Image (tube, rainbow, N blue to C red):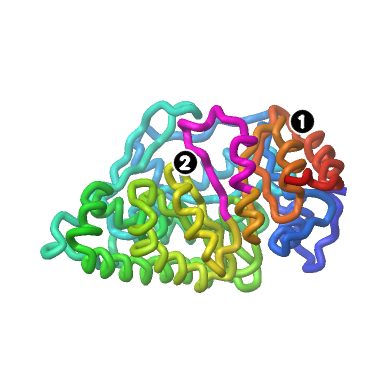
Amino acid sequence: MSSTLPDKNGVEPLQYKENWPAARQRLLAFWEHEIIDRVCVGISAPREKRVLLPESPDIEFQQTDPDLHQARLHAEFGNRYYGGESLPISGTHLGYAFFGGKPAFERGASGYGITDYMFVDPVIEDWQRTPYRFDANSKWCRRFLEITRREYAESHGKYLSTLGAVLAPTDVLGLLRGYGPLCFDMFDNPEQVRQALRELRRAYRWAWGWFHDLSDADRNGSEIVSMWGPGRNVCLSCDFSCLIGPELYREFVMPEMEELTRWFDHSFYHLDGEDALQHIPALLELEHLDGIQFNPGHRDAHYPVTRWLPLFKQIQDAGKLVQLSASHEEVETVLEVLGPRGVFISTGAESIEAAETLLRNAERWSCRQPLRQ
């Protein structure tokens, strides 16, 4: 049943996502807080036959050359099995430089092996001499749009495409000004901060409007926090919020969230780290925010998902959708507490067979009544 659900709109399978029509139907039900046959589960697994990703010794070239970028995307998508509602979605790190920062490229070790990193050096040194102005004709903005346009053109019938690494306005301002100076600016230069945030919100809407027009999101839908939904969608976030308290959050960040959640058809908020949980009450007040994803962060990665189930239940009880990450072994526990409706579970498996077994089990677990709290 997991691969044969009919699609009323005649949507065809994708090269890297053969069960895309069925996954799309389950996701449509998810946005309505309903299910078809089971909870939405995004589960991926490595394929037995894998190829090495093409590389260049020049880190900037590897990050910015459209041909190499496409070759790496196809290799990466071909190496993985996208089970359930897991999706092959393209994106480029160049979004960090879209708003005018100075990009810097580095290569180093990570938990995933050798990884390329892109950073943005601050450019707002003094509010009087360097007030923020968005320039759609800047070198890095044009390069980012070029790669994104190429990604979308290449995606037809193969994978899904979105804007990569386009941060929400307050996080962008933190990069352009520096997180430390921005904290002081909220006390010493509040009007300059508000003016810059208004300009960044305008640029943010311009970027997403450009892409949603390019991809005909009104008809095709669009990606949102590694999922898909109908219409024009966005994942909002504010990692900078870990450095400020609830009063400053309501003063400087909430106007951004209220405006943008109204502007898009669907919105999720990516809550990153335990220090950001202080802003949950404000977020749950956002009428047009559809859902919240919480990532405990690296320092809390060893905790089981059960530690955070009361938080997800609080979000759920406020009428919001939930997206969470759980280990393969924790999925049943999540469903026992939260139930299957309005929940998206991201997980992984060691093999395709293990992934398919979990999906079959999830269908059975989704029939149970959640435990009373």
Please, what is the three-letter code of the amino acid marked with disc 1?
A: Ala
Image coordinates for residue 331, horizontal then vertical, percent: 72, 37
Q: Determine which of the numbered discs, if any, sits on residue 354 in the image.
A: 1
Q: Quadrant of residue 127?
A: bottom left
Q: Which residues are magenta?
A: 292-312
Please, what is the three-letter code of the amino acid marked with disc 2?
A: Glu
- Residue at 83% x, 37% y is 361
Res 18 seen here: no
Q: In what quadrant of the picture does the C terminus appear?
A: top right
Res 61 seen here: yes
Q: Determine which of the numbered discs, if any, sits on residue 274 in the image.
A: 2
User: Is residue 305 inside the magenta stretch?
Assistant: yes
> Of 260 and 275, which appears nearest the observer?
275
> Of 152 and 357, which appears nearest the observer?
357
- Residue at 41% x, 64% y is 254
Image coordinates for residue 62, horizontal then vertical, percent: 40, 41
